[in-house]
Image: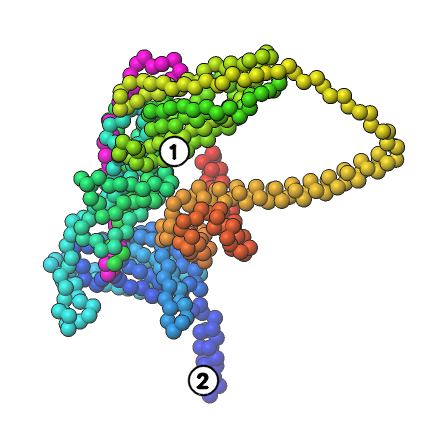
């Protein structure tokens, strides 16, 4: 009897002291054709921290490769259940029965190996119908052409310094809900072009091009730098069908496009600074009467077809401010092209009194349509410059006693020091926040969803922090990181800043290792 109680107490102690992990492992299919992907999904509850241990595992010639991290949300009886999922992909071509390699994951920091699973590879297989024989028993495997991602530009021939638009498009006829996301681990090849991501731009697809999806997250403005024939847009995308049962995201290399860049003709005008397009200039005086020694202010606006590069103000004029607004839109000619408005606030200081006439302002440009150089110029109207104003006499100030002066000085210094200290601390805090937000925005880029979750977890950010940031960027997809930060409560703000600090410290360690 005594030994029975002892064994019973030992079993209770062992069950309480052992960690309780709810880990679920599933295969997307148990029977597949040679080369057809099989997804191994490893799932735990959101209360547990799930991390990958290795990127790939192999056994008996079967290889499982890490595909990404995701999260799932289910609502059952008005209760919300969240879980974290790691996905590995197997692509086996040998027929027969095979075993899944022993994939090891980290649950709350503890190493766990998934249970043994097996799958069958056979030719001409049929996929079981999940609704049973009532609806036909089995369904034939869907066949369709492999997906293609192509890079397109609005022009195939440009001149040096000319701006064009580039974008990616997906072609595949068998997808019901296509998924398209650029792989952040692969850079985009734009040799001898300067690239920038354009905002608030709509692409009109020509009739000759009929893709099923245009990747509108990243539409590029590309400026040619060197003559020649260049291949643009080589990179990788993740492609899949969101509505297909057991779907996966396949890495697909893009098909680049060739663009011919022509050199600018010689000789160029003396005041040509690389502007390509067709422009006209306007001028508006901001002052009509000044005294000698005072500057004359005026505004110059250069508008027209083109990207706005190469438009500048020469001396003796001094530029106070420059604003550039470039849009890709439908022009009066019916074509779609860039249209720029460059506005300068300019000053010049007269050296003599009387009627002042400033030199003309000329802007040279090269027109790709006319294949020749052009020029537009403006001149400031005559401004009346009066004699310099005589200095005003200052009335004498009544003397102040030494004691009152000393008391006032000390009071002012103490007040100034207190206000300065508070202002400096607040400024330092805001500078640090802005620095961390700018770093985080630059580091994360355009990543969303599972790509963002994978990116953060690969850098040792906890799953709870990763899910929080993924959910914020998903809920406020149309807002920048600074705007999202401003909407958050204090604990969430501290969480975002903590993520940025960890990434920044990791980046600093990598930099130090490179220097060594």
**Can the viewer see residue 53?**
no
For mark 2, give the secondary structure.
helix
Badge 1 crowding class, 10 Å Cα cut-off, few under 14, some 14 to 19, many 20 or more, is some
- Residue 443 lies, with reference to residue 95, above or below; the image says above
Say which label, 1 or 2, has the lower sequence index.
2
Depth check, front residue: 419 or 445: 419
Depth check, front residue: 371 or 215: 371
Q: Which residues are magenta?
A: 244-272
Residue assigned mark 2: 4
Give the image location of residue 514, x and y in percent: 45, 36
Name the residue at 77% across, 23% down.
394
| Residue 44: quarter of image | bottom left
Give the image location of residue 21, x and y in percent: 40, 67
- Left or right of residue 421, residue 98 in this image: left
Measure how far apart labels 1 and 2 are at the Cα level.
84 Å
Residue assigned mark 1: 326
- Left or right of residue 495, residue 268 in this image: left
Name the residue at 65% across, 16% down.
388
In reply to whether residue 266 is colored magenta, the answer given is: yes
């Amino acid at each position: 009897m005594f030994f029975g109680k002892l064994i019973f107490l030992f079993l209770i102690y062992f069950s309480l002291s052992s960690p309780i992990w709810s880990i679920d492992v599933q295969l997307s299919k148990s029977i597949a054709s040679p080369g057809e992907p099989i997804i191994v999904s490893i799932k735990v509850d959101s209360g547990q921290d799930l991390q990958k241990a290795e990127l790939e595992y192999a056994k008996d010639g079967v290889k499982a490769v890490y595909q990404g991290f995701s999260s799932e949300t289910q609502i059952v009886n008005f209760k919300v259940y969240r879980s974290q999922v790691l996905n590995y992909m197997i692509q086996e071509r040998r027929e027969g029965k095979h075993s899944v390699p022993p994939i090891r994951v980290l649950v709350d920091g503890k190493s766990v190996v998934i249970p043994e699973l097996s799958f069958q590879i056979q030719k001409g297989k049929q996929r079981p119908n999940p609704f049973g024989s009532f609806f036909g028993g089995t369904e034939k495997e869907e066949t369709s052409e492999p997906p293609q991602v192509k890079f397109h530009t609005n022009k195939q021939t440009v001149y040096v310094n000319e701006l064009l638009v580039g974008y990616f498009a997906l072609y595949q006829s068998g997808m019901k809900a296509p998924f398209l996301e650029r792989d952040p681990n692969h850079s985009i090849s734009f040799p001898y072009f300067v690239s920038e991501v354009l905002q608030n731009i709509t692409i009109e697809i020509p009739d000759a091009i009929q893709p099923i999806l245009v990747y509108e997250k990243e539409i590029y403005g590309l400026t040619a730098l060197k003559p020649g024939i260049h291949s643009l847009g080589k990179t990788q995308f993740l492609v899949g069908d969101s509505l297909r049962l057991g779907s996966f995201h396949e890495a697909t290399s893009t098909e680049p496009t060739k663009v011919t860049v022509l050199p600018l003709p010689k000789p160029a005008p003396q005041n040509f600074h690389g502007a390509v397009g067709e422009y006209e200039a306007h001028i508006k005086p901001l002052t009509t009467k000044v005294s000698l020694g005072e500057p004359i202010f005026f505004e110059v606006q250069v508008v027209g077809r083109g990207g706005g590069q190469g438009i500048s103000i020469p001396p003796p004029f001094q530029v106070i401010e420059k604003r550039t607004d470039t849009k890709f839109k439908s022009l009066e000619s019916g074509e779609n092209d860039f249209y720029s408005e460059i506005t300068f606030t300019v000053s010049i200081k007269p050296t003599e009194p009387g009627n002042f006439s400033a030199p003309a302002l000329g802007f040279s440009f090269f027109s790709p349509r006319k294949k020749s150089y052009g020029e537009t110029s403006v001149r400031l109207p005559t401004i009346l410059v009066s004699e310099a104003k005589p200095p005003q006499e200052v009335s004498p100030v009544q003397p102040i006693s030494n004691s009152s002066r000393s008391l006032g000085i000390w009071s002012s210094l103490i007040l100034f020091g207190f206000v300065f200290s508070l202002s400096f601390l607040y400024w330092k805090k805001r500078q640090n926040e802005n620095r961390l937000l700018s770093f985080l925005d630059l580091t994360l880029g355009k990543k969303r969803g599972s790509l963002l979750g994978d990116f953060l977890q690969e850098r040792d950010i906890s799953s709870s922090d990763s899910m929080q940031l993924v959910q914020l960027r998903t809920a406020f997809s149309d807002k920048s990181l600074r705007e999202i930060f401003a909407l958050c409560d204090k604990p969430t703000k501290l969480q975002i800043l903590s993520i940025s600090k960890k990434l920044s410290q990791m980046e600093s360690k990598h930099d130090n290792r490179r220097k060594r």
